[in-house]
Structures are given as structure tokens and as C-alpha cells.
Image (cartoon, grey):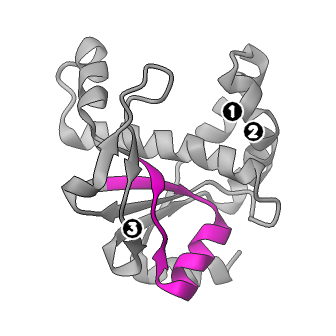
Amino acid sequence: MRVYLPATTTVLRALVDEGRLPEPQTVFAVTPQLREYYALSAADADTEELEYAALLAAARASLRLLDVDPLAARRRAVLAADVPDDAVTPMDDPHVDPGAARLAYAVRLQDVASAHLDGAEAEDDVRAAVNVVLEADLGSDDAQFVVDQAEGHELAWYASQEIGSALELL
């Protein structure tokens, strides 16, 4: 199963240095709950579109991780990894994102298909969003506007073997 793991540059560095990230992890994936959610508004959404929705949810979660990781670059980061299906347990909770799941599997560098990372032009918007993402989660329209500005930046794609090089350029 393809999962999207929210991360920070600190997490990416740990993955490169140690070759793995310990379990458990919160990830986002095409869960039955995500399929059901999109069946109501976009019934014709294919797997690729649902995976993109899971990627965006992981990017939003990356903002929350940046809030507690002051040493990380102010850029959203997401890892796309292929893991055993039975290691993924969807969170069946109406208060969490429908693609949220728990991963009971150590993500190894060789499991990572790609990394997705904001470019330098997003840093100011991401920095501002990190400061208000929790307020946006609680329903503040003003905070959501700031988060939307950060989410308006497309994440760059990196092959797994390029993660170390990308980190060196920060």
C-alpha cells in the first residue's frame, strides 16, 4: 500500500542518516474512509486523485510537525512509501482526516518511492502557516486563509536517492 508520511527536514535527515524511521507512525493513505468521503463529492475520483488527496493531507500534517520542530527548515515535507497492507490501520474516527491511518512498520529508505518538499519560495508562507495551523484546525477563518497561502505552493518531487542532496541544498 502506498502511504504518505508527514515529515520535516529533521525527519528526512534522520531517514537518510539511519536508513529507517521507527514505527508506529501516523500516515495518510487511500483508506476506505477516504474513498467513502470522496464518493459523496467526487464519485468519479480515481486512485491517483485519491492518493493526491492523501498527499495533501500529509502536507497539512507536516505543518503541525513543523510547529514542534524549531530546528527544521520551514518547508513542508512528505514521504511516499510502499508498505505491507497489513501494517496500515485506518483511523475510523470522524474527528480525523478520512485518509489518516496508523502504520505499524518501520519505514526503510528502500521503501520510500519519493519525497515531496516545498521550494525556497514557500518558506515565508509556510512559516506564517506554522504559526496559525492549530487555530485553523479549530475553525479560524483568518488562520485558514494563512494556511491556504502555504498550501497553494506545489511540493517538488524528489526520488528517494535525491533526498540527501536536496537536504544539502537547504
Q: Earlier in the sequence, mark 2 or mark 3?
A: 3
At label 2, which amino acid type do we have? Answer: Ala
Residue ID at (60%, 49%): 62
The residue identified by callout 2 is: 129
- Rendered position, 17 above or below 119: below
At label 3, which amino acid type do we have? Answer: Ser
Residue ID at (61%, 78%): 13
The answer to which image quadrant residue 167 occupies is bottom right
- Indicate the position of residue 155 as horizontal and vertical percent values: 52, 54
Distance from the alpha carbon under mark 3 to that under mark 1: 24 Å
- Indicate the position of residue 75 as horizontal and vertical percent values: 68, 57
Foreground pick, 88 / 113: 88
User: Residue 147 shows which numbered tag?
Assistant: 1
Q: Which residues are magenta?
A: 3-27
- Indicate the position of residue 84 as horizontal and vertical percent values: 22, 62
The residue identified by callout 3 is: 114
Q: Is residue 54 left or right of residue 86?
A: right
- Rendered position, 32 above or below 159: above
Q: Earlier in the sequence, mark 1 or mark 2?
A: 2
Element on which disc 1 rests:
helix
